């Protein structure tokens, strides 16, 4: 039974630390450079009109067929935008839920170990994460230098 309780406390502690870091990053902390590189550039969506024109040229569609295809593409685009908005609101709900859970976890941890030890724990965790971020930036800069050298050769 003690193992289960210990495991649960460790899991809660890890979750709390992760959420705290994420909250700090959202509040203006520095993001690791590697995260920026991993992001895909935004692609510009081709308009339904242009898609219909391209298809009409490729398949020799009549004007009526082209108009119907364009209407279908517009309908499809509207549905995609709706899905995107739903996913965005769902992310915001999940973020709010996780923030509430993190605050509850921190409050319970403060009850157990006291505010002074909790502040000490937070400072240690922040220092450890800053060190990790520094190492990631250095690694990322090294990889960028390798790419530059490779391009120059």
Image (cartoon, rainbow, N blue to C red):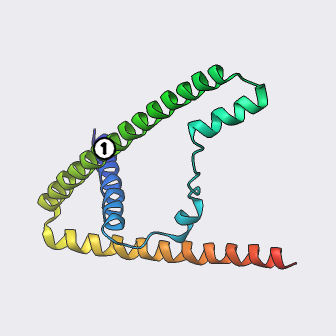
Q: Is residue 48 left or right of residue 131?
A: right
> At 15% from the left edge and 54% from the top edge, which residue is drawn?
108
Mark yes or no: residue 3 visible: no
> At 64% from the left edge and 26% from the top edge, which residue is drawn?
66
Q: Quadrant of residue 46?
A: top right
Q: Is residue 45 left or right of residue 83?
A: right
In the rendered image, the residue lying farthest to the front is 63
Q: Quadrant of residue 2?
A: top left
Give percent across and percent down for residue 104.
17, 51
Mark yes or no: residue 100 visible: yes
Mark 1 surroundings: few (<14), some (14-19) or many (≥20) residues within 10 A? few
Please name the residue that numbered disc 1 is placed on. 94
Give percent across and percent down for residue 54.
71, 36
Q: Secondary structure at mark 1?
A: helix
Count the marks: how many? 1
> At 33% from the left edge and 74% from the top edge, which residue is drawn?
124
Q: Is residue 97 left or right of residue 141?
A: left
Above or below, 111 relative to 46: below
Give percent across and percent down for residue 121.
27, 70
> Nearest the camera: 58 or 37?
58
**Quadrant where the image shows the N terminus:** top left
């Amino acid at each position: 039974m003690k193992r289960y309780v210990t495991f649960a406390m460790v899991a809660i502690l890890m979750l709390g630390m992760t959420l705290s870091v994420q909250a700090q990053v959202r509040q203006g902390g520095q993001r690791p450079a590697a995260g920026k590189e991993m992001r895909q550039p935004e692609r510009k969506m081709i308009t339904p009109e242009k898609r219909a024109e391209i298809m009409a040229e490729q398949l020799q569609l009549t004007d009526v067929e082209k108009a119907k295809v364009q209407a279908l593409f517009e309908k499809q685009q509207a549905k995609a935008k709706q899905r995107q908005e739903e996913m965005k609101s769902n992310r915001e709900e999940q973020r709010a839920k996780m923030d509430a859970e993190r605050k509850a976890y921190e409050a319970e941890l403060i009850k157990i170990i006291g505010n002074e030890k909790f502040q000490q724990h937070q400072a240690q965790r922040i220092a450890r994460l800053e060190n990790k971020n520094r190492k990631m930036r250095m690694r990322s800069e090294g990889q960028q230098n390798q790419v530059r050298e490779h391009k120059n050769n």
